[in-house]
Image (cartoon, coloured by chain):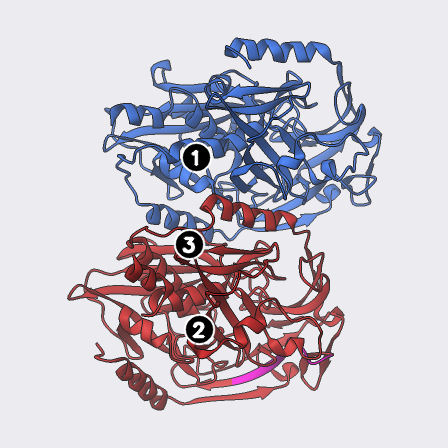
Chain colours: A blue, B red
Amino acid sequence: MFTTTADVCGWLADRRAANEYWVKEVPLEKMDGWRIRPGGDIAHRTGRFYTVTGLEVTGADRPVGAWQQPIIDQPEIGVLGILVKRFNGVPHCLLQAKMEPGNVNMLELSPTVQATKSNYTRAHGGKSVPYLDYFLAPRGGTVLFDALQSEQGAWFLAKRNRNMIVEATGDVPVLPDFCWVSFEQVGELLRIDNMMNMDTRTVLSGAAVLRQASDDEDERPRHSVADLLSWFTEAKARSSMTRRRIPLSAVSEWDYENGTITHRDERHFTVLGLEVRASNREVSGWSQPMIAPRGQGVVAFLGKRVQGTTHLLIQARTEAGAFDTVEMAPTVQCLPDNYKDLPDQPPFLRDVLSAPASRIRFDSVHSEEGGRFFHAQNRYMFVELPQDEPEPDLPENFVWMTPRQLMGFVRYGNHLNVEARSLVACLGLSADSPSHEERSVA
Amino acid sequence: MFTTTADVCGWLADRRAANEYWVKEVPLEKMDGWRIRPGGDIAHRTGRFYTVTGLEVTGADRPVGAWQQPIIDQPEIGVLGILVKRFNGVPHCLLQAKMEPGNVNMLELSPTVQATKSNYTRAHGGKSVPYLDYFLAPRGGTVLFDALQSEQGAWFLAKRNRNMIVEATGDVPVLPDFCWVSFEQVGELLRIDNMMNMDTRTVLSGAAVLRQASDDEDERPRHSVADLLSWFTEAKARSSMTRRRIPLSAVSEWDYENGTITHRDERHFTVLGLEVRASNREVSGWSQPMIAPRGQGVVAFLGKRVQGTTHLLIQARTEAGAFDTVEMAPTVQCLPDNYKDLPDQPPFLRDVLSAPASRIRFDSVHSEEGGRFFHAQNRYMFVELPQDEPEPDLPENFVWMTPRQLMGFVRYGNHLNVEARSLVACLGLSADSPSHEERSVA
């Protein structure tokens, strides 16, 4: 057990020093174990893990309505699970110091279990997945949260993982590379850059929901839940997006050159190959294709007090790979570099980036899944609009809702995208969150 | 306004007599406006409305895990909307006497609006859809319920419609073929065979939810909502079903003969062509392909009092065409004729069909969507298990939940299949429902 958050950081640094990691970019066609199929799709020679393929999108409810792009196809549902146990009545999360080749700092804190179906059915031919028995039925422990949740709709084709929180009652042996962290420490760690990996954050959004559920209900929301569900249904019904898989080599505006796949205007992302060595992973060395976004992204909620209650501005966002086309997303979610030299900027981006420090309530850089995305960092922010200015006009795909209302949608799955869930975890579990403030006001 | 339910029936008979309907089976290749594409798919010559195509299913969590079948592909999201208005404080639904060629009695009561996107964007070249303005934004009235809901997963490929209930405040002119019916009358009409069409029933499941919400909360459920969501997530994660569209003429075990498509063993359903004339539809005459199931189906909840609270036995059911593979379904949902001469019967079918009248709490025959399905009747039942017998062992895809818990899932869409929603409407709105009984006990 750690006394302070600094102890956790020290332990993670020790784990980093105790193992050896080595990552090198290699041309896509030189990756060991992978092959380029006729048509250009990049697949593992076993046909498992994932494939980089092409997608054609038309009729999207976005500034640019039609495009083609490379995308990762991984149809299996994996398990992301955090084991919770009370010590002297205080619930703690069992987290793992896990190396992923796409992490800027190699090691971050991952959930207790972070396993694709290929992982836990041993497609790797590697070690078994520790603690998996707590998450697969018939399981030991009590399920507190269990939902299928989507992952990055810009880069994944309808990818979903099972997000689980299970409370253990009996003794839980702590293996090397694992540690117990209290929720208070979790909240502090979420404020530190690149400590909590994406899988930890999405599972923790479920924990934010659980903590929220026991709060008082004194808030005065602008809209009823029925209104919000109707707004969401309307956005889905409005969408006439169609998606079609196409061969990767047929994707227009993208070029395969020098062993990587890049966008003609150097926007969006690059598909590159990595060669990896690690001393503490299931397999000691492997190669894999990854998506490397261009520049650092911005993921932000704009907030405002309405009728004395904090509201967040939520976007119904159409994404190429989203399981059901449209999901609830943060106010701002973009790679600003994509809009360089373009006249139209994403709505509210300027409000976020030009806010003075006094109105920035949360501001940390976190990485997306380091097992698929290379150095994919986003600046996660919560920015308050000035109280004395009139409310901004909203495009039809934006709506105000309270943190409690937003969290109410998390448990049903398929409502919030992964970026919104990351922010929900950050705001719901860190000390200076909007929901905490409501309580102090109430 | 009607004084009694008999008045509604009389009015519907009058409407039936005031118009002329004429339906004739024609060979699929002779349907006006439709053509057989290379590969055998049956499509409208405009490419709109819907297509009958083939589907290959593998890895389904069902007694038979792999098969091929014809299926209807209609990717658009239509609107099913009921307009509600209070008269002297009593809410009434605006229903329509609507002819559908697949109805056994031609005319049934449909929602205020029942429109495919083709309908309301005038692909028919027909009349405009009355009352549609109440349901499309910016709308008059207050949205009470609004969710995307699936339709028959056995016959539709990922078909969903927007189910809406909107309350009007101002004057609403009543057009011919429309009438106001109170919720009390709705409850009685749901007990009469083939009066309330499928679209009315699925929208009314949302009304059952609204009425439920204001009830007391004295029930003692066997499982928490978190447990139920976990059971549902687990069923989805367990599924390894894959689906692939194939040309209709490539579907094995099905034959195109004498202008219809039939299963080799005369099971499941027939695809047939209809020629239709009606004096009060948007277009006076048309042809269309339809699915005609073999025999009458059984759709039933088994119920039992557990800890003094009525519980329903719910099935996590894998269906070929379900939007997300698995949905919450009634205890029993099958065509018994499919199991003639087979050793294994569906679980709990015998418990339902052999129950004495004293344990049958609901028993009405209703038809599925008469615009796509020909004489597709199901016997909808609610049967109580004997109190003095031990609980039956449950297969892993069955679970007990209370009517309130089940209804709680309706508003989020994609949880209950259309057969379960029909039963929820029947039980939630008819007088002798389980939830009403709970109140009297409490």
Disc 3 from disc 2: Cα separation:
19 Å
Using the image as rendered, state which of residue A108 and residue B277 is in the foreground.
A108
> Disc 2 or disc 1, which is closer to the eye?
2
Q: Quadrant of the N terminus of chain A?
A: top right
- Residue B246 in view, yes or no: yes
Q: Residue furthest left?
A: B88
Question: How many neighbours does mark 1 have within 10 angstroms: few (below 14), some (14-19), or many (20 or more)?
Answer: many
- Residue position marked by numbered label 2 in the rendering: B359
- Residue position marked by numbered label 3 in the rendering: B307
- Residue B182 in view, yes or no: no
Disc 2 sits on a residue from what chain? B
Question: How many neighbours does mark 2 have within 10 angstroms: few (below 14), some (14-19), or many (20 or more)?
Answer: some
Disc 3 from disc 1: Cα separation:
29 Å
Disc 3 sits on a residue from what chain? B
Main secondary structure along the magenta-highlighted residues: strand
Is residue B275 placed above or below A335 in the rendered structure? below
Residue B272 lies in the magenta-colored region: yes
Q: Which residues are magenta?
A: B265-275
Disc 1 sits on a residue from what chain? A
- Counting residues from the start of the chain, the first of labels 3 and 2 encountered is 3
Using the image as rendered, state which of residue B87 and residue B190 is in the foreground.
B190
Secondary structure under tag 1 reads helix
- Residue position marked by numbered label 1 in the rendering: A209
